[in-house]
Image: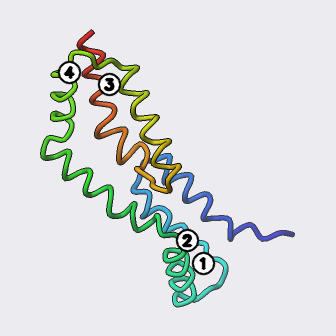
Amino acid sequence: MIDLWPMIGVVIITIGFACRLNTLLVILVAGFATGLVAKLNIIEILSILGSSFTKNRYMSLFILVLPMIGLLESYGLRERAEALISSMKQATVTKITLSYLILRKVTVAIGLNLGGHPSMIRPLVAPMVESASNKG
């Protein structure tokens, strides 16, 4: 019979995401639970998590970007983006969306990643598009 207990991490991640809990915390708890069920000691689990963390450079960017975006939003980033688009007479939803798409493609082509939904679309592009759609 196959022992399925080491798959408990998948169940923890599924439930954690369904309950909309903190993503990083859910993943860490799932990793620890899986390691403990697989009979690894705490040092081995921390070693695996640490090496995975250092191999994946984007995780550290994720940890830095989200608090910065939250801070900028608390100081009125969304309102400033809406005001900027409201002041532009020629701004339309299509032009804003197409401009973001072109900017994203150009930066990816040269090896830069501006980020996706949490760092660009939600705080900047979405308010600009909403403001443009309310104008016309």
Please report the residue visible at 49 percent of the width from the left and 68 percent of the height from the top.
Answer: 29
Q: Name the secondary structure under disc 3.
A: helix
- Ranked by sequence position, the earlier of labels 3 and 4 is 4
- From this view, report whether residue 116 is shown above or below residue 132: below
Please report the residue visible at 45 percent of the width from the left and 65 percent of the height from the top.
Answer: 59
On screen, residue 120 versus residue 87, left or right, reads: right
Residue at mark 2: 31
Q: Residues within 10 Å of mark 4 (few under 14, many from 20)?
A: few
Query: Of 5 and 10, which appears nearest the observer?
Result: 10
Residue 135 lies, in percent from the top left, at 23, 13
Q: Amino acid at mark 4?
A: Met
Q: Name the secondary structure under disc 4.
A: loop
Residue 31 lies, in percent from the top left, at 55, 71
- Ranked by sequence position, the earlier of labels 3 and 1 is 1
Q: Name the secondary structure under disc 1.
A: helix
- Ranked by sequence position, the earlier of labels 4 and 1 is 1
On screen, residue 111 versus residue 88, left or right, reads: right
Front: mark 2 or 3: 3
For the C terminus, the quadrant is top left
Please report the residue visible at 74 percent of the width from the left and 66 percent of the height from the top.
Answer: 4
Residue at mark 3: 129
Q: Amino acid at mark 2?
A: Gly
Residue at mark 4: 88
Front: mark 3 or 1: 3
Q: Amino acid at mark 1?
A: Gly
Quarter holding residue 122: top left
Q: Gap in Å between the C-alphas at discs 1 and 2?
A: 6 Å
Q: Gap in Å between the C-alphas at discs 2 and 3?
A: 39 Å
